[in-house]
Amino acid sequence: MENFKIISRSENDTAKLAQELASKLPRGTVIALYGDLGAGKTVFSRAFAKAIGVKETVSSPTYTIIQEYLLDDGGYFYHLDLYRIKNSRDALAFAVDEYLNDGNAYALVEWPERIEDILGADTLIININHLSDTEREISVGK
């Protein structure tokens, strides 16, 4: 996938990007989703999950760290929120590597800076940066 940037002017714009990426990415994809609190990571995560067939409401798993969603065809969507994790050693205690290496699943990681040293080279990197109250610059690349 080519690297690109967009300007999102609404939550709807962010959701559309997530849906578009969901239609193009294969199972086994790990998405590292960077952004400050309130940047729009949960908006992106919910739209991505819905686009791949998750029927439950997706919420940020800040306290549970990992949420698993079974897809209709037997695959999974793993939503990891590592805000409360200090480093990859702590993340490995939760078997995060198993989620990152599941070829029959999508793994979306919020706060991936905590585990950069164990993310694969093929991880899709998404950065959501505040430009204003309503605008975000979203960059996508490897």
Image (cartoon, grey):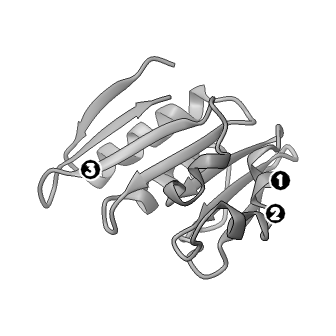
Marks 3 and 2, how far apart at CA: 29 Å
Marks 1 and 3, how far apart at CA: 29 Å
The residue identified by callout 2 is 95
Residue depicted at x 75% and y 59%: 96
> Is 29 on the left or on the right of 126, as rendered?
right
- Please, what is the three-letter code of the amino acid marked with disc 3? Asn
Q: Secondary structure at mark 3?
A: strand
Q: Position of residue 92 (x, y in %)?
A: 76, 63
Q: Mark 3 or mark 2: which is in front?
A: 2
Residue depicted at x 16% and y 56%: 134
Q: Position of residue 115 (x, y in %)?
A: 60, 55
Up-down: is 141 above or below 138?
above
> Is 22 on the left or on the right of 70, as rendered?
left
The residue identified by callout 3 is 129
Residue 98 image label: 1
Give 33 or 7, whichever is nearer the viewer.
33
Instruction: Tell me if label 2 and label 1 are in contact, CB under 8 Å.
Output: yes
Up-down: is 26 above or below 92?
above
Up-down: is 10 above or below 58?
above
Within 10 angstroms of label 2, few (less than 14), some, or many (20 or more) residues?
Answer: few
Within 10 angstroms of label 1, few (less than 14), some, or many (20 or more) residues?
Answer: few
Q: Residue furthest top?
A: 2
Q: Which label's residue is closer to the chain start, 3 or 2?
A: 2
Q: Which label's residue is closer to the chain start, 1 or 3?
A: 1
Give 5 or 71, whichever is nearer the viewer.
5
